[in-house]
Image: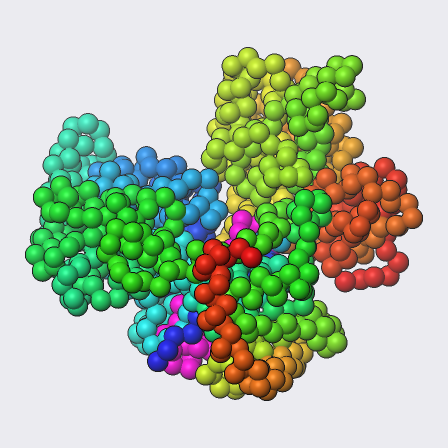
Amino acid sequence: MRKIDVLMAGVGGQGVILASDSLAEVAMRAGFDVKKSDAIGMAQRGGSVVSHIRIGAKVFAPLIKKGEADFLVGFERLEAARCASYINPNGLAIISDQELPPLSVAGDAASYPDQEKVARVVSLYTKRLAFVPGLRIAQALGNARVAGVVLLGFLSAFLPVEVALWQEDIARRVDAKFREINLKAFAQGREEAMVFRSTETEAKAVVREEVPKRLRNITRNGGRR
Amino acid sequence: MRRLLSGNEAIALGAYHAGVSVATAYPGTPSTEILENLARLPGPYVEWSANEKVAMEVGLGASYGGVRALVSMKHVGLNVAADPFFAASVTGVRGGLVVVSCDDPGMHSSQGEQDNRHFARFAKIPMLEPSDSQEAYDLMSIAFQLSEEFDTPVMVRSTTRISHCKGVVEIGEAASWQPKRPRFIRDLDKFVMVPSNARKRRPLMEERVATLARWADNFPKNEVIIQNTRLGVIASGAAYQYAREVFKKASFLKLVATYPLPKQLIADFSRQVETLVVVEELDPFMEEQIRAMGLEVKGKEFVPPIGELTIDTLEDSAHRVGLLKNVRRALSRKETQVELPVRPPVLCAGCPHIATSFVLRRLGFYRHLNPLEANEGGKLPSGLRQGGIIATSDIGCYTLAVYPPLLALDTCACMGASIGQALGLEKAGVANKIVAVIGDSTFVHSGITGLVDMVYNQSAGTVVILDNDTTGMTGHQGHPGTGISPRGEKLTKVDLEYLCRGLGVRDVNVVNAFDIAQIEHTLRRCVESEETSVIIARGPCPLKERPTSRPFSIDADRCDGCATCLRLGCPALLREGDKATIDKGRCVGDACGICLQVCPREAIVRAEKEIA
């Protein structure tokens, strides 16, 4: 079996660890070997959080190699851009619409990247990019905190794991009173993915031709444009 | 039963199923979760010890009492515990004694990087290194057996990437907790290390190492994997996992017992391969010993001795020395040149350490100002001279105040060092006023003895204990100053005010950590006084207490964009155009309110009815 490498990136407090725990658990239940490693900063809250999840018949290294991730799940735009170099040329970047400017931005030392800039960074590594309205969906459901579960639902549509396993795991992981809203968020994320997949299939022929050519250009210019 | 466990969870569960009776620790990343997970299981006695030295002593005592004991700590914790650790090697044990050291290659959350494998060799204590969660689980019962069989403490060395990585672990259905019966048998020759007795134990230690080396030669977890014999790789721990992916076709000797080294096994392996390399994180620990055996071996010529190993670095360097050919160049080489804002670690919104740090910055640190501006007139508003206060700091959340915008601290060496350093600076005769900053947990860990020294030696310094009633940085563990056990029970609370007074400090003050005026007033008085003083700035950690109060907002008409509030470094305060704004999702409102106190325009207001 081919391996599946998933990198999740966000900010402390966003639920990155919860989502990656869930993914690792369902992958194990689906019969795969799994390794999951969290890289958390010093701060309890507000720091960068990156979770490496590796799934396969037998997994050795606990960390994903740069340029190897099949999926990058960005819970926040800036952190997604920061991890873009992990994606492989056929990998899919799934990025939430959430913005959490760090203090360096508040202190006027830097500016927060807009969606276009993030798309530009990601496109250096892959053409497959989906901006997901995770926060908007979560807010519409009535709780901004389930934005991460929307992303998980989106991701789930691309993985060889039965949807029932996901639903069981999410139900087990969250408080009874938040169960319904989490399952709804998951379902809506999955639905978004279905829409994305259908539009992507149409564009695929173009992408296949373009990616290798683009990468050759990047190699020549050392990544500078 | 298959379960997904982190290395630390696996160590805890493995120790449990090995019948551990006493487990002690001081919290420290990446080791903390070992004791936390044991505390969730019924049966064993678990404690957050005041520091690692005490933890080791309690563990050793339990072992003398015939039961199995586990002592866990981060790498630098073993420095603190070194004294009883070495002593344990001399006396040996009764019940198994396992010491888990969790090293932090790459310094994800540590003040230094050290390879604690040297400690095992230094103390002549056998060491086992798991390379994943399954091994971490399996090794615990082996470690306890080994300890009892060879009359020695056993060190298990983990690293961040083992401790914090989750992997699949197979656990026997019948696994349960079966402790040993406590029993102390008096044995003065063994337990009382007066020189005449210690001299008799010394040769036994050397014999033990020699016997253990022979044991390691036949230890089945030291695994030989023969594939292509052109390249043979010797590796342990997380490094083994990286090496397996980089050298896909090579032969491997995976070592789990890495001190003493299984020399016969290594020699046999070396004969089966053309080129021998050692892949290990940090120091050439195995490499140098293998070379001393007379074997030709490559290692640190291409494996970096600094930082955590990654597949990328290993692959790149293997490529460089010609061990790998035609590798697809890592994409990291094409790293984007697009500039992205950094996200430095920050104190949380509502953190009780922000106000004190802000005041310290305001009173000291004039050297950060434009020098022309500072020299003008000579006098500064506080009445203190330029460079007025030096703030020595310690290890904890509050250390984050060293980053911009607070820039409030001058030193940070190790747990408990701020107080001793302050005394040292004072006795050195520097002209500045000196304030030592320390957290409540850290004060109990190793600040108390420093304060005793200050009192005894008539220091004029000030110690600020930032008391958030928990061990914040590692995730809210209890300590003697909180009176909360790792199982969440209420124990006896050590009262910090009385403790300080009992040590002989006459000037002990307790201030509200969210009251800037009170903190500043008290601090000014204390640094001017000629006697040792203590200020306890008390306020709860917002992540532990989860205050619910109305968040503030900013009246944009009044805000003139002076950015004073942004200097607090509160993550709820953001810049929006020329003005400041408040992230209502993060602001804890009245539970904090320090921004209200610093805004010169009174532009920060209580929100009408917006409850997050």
Query: Is residue B424 among what the camera can see?
Result: yes
Q: Position of residue B557 (x, y in %)?
A: 92, 48
Location of the C terminus of chain B by quadrant is: bottom right
**Image quarter for residue B358?**
top right
**Image quarter for residue B165?**
bottom left
Is residue A37 rendered magenta in the image? yes
Task: Tell me what residue is drawn at x 37 percent, y 71 percent.
Answer: B168
Query: Is residue A16 among what the camera can see?
Result: no
Task: Tell me what residue is drawn at x 71 percent, y 32 percent.
Answer: B359
State the count of labels.
0
B541 lies left or right of B127: right
A123 lies left or right of B214: right
In the rendered image, the vertical position of residue B413 relative to residue A57, given as above or below: above
Is residue B462 rendered magenta in the image? no
- What residue range appears in magenta? A23-45
Query: Which coloring applies here?
Result: rainbow
Q: Position of residue B52 (x, y in %)?
A: 41, 42
**Image quarter for residue B249?**
bottom left
Task: Tell me what residue is drawn at x 80 percent, y 50 percent.
Answer: B577
Q: Position of residue B510 (x, y in %)?
A: 69, 34
- Name the foreground residue: A107 vs B461: A107
Q: Position of residue B558 (x, y in %)?
A: 90, 45
B77 lies left or right of B403: left
In the rendered image, the vertical position of residue B153 relative to residue B409, given as above or below: below
B7 lies left or right of A79: left
Location of the N terminus of chain B by quadrant is: bottom left
Q: Residue furthest right?
A: B557
Task: Tell me what residue is drawn at x 23 percent, y 41 percent.
Answer: B121
- Name the foreground residue: B564 vs A43: B564
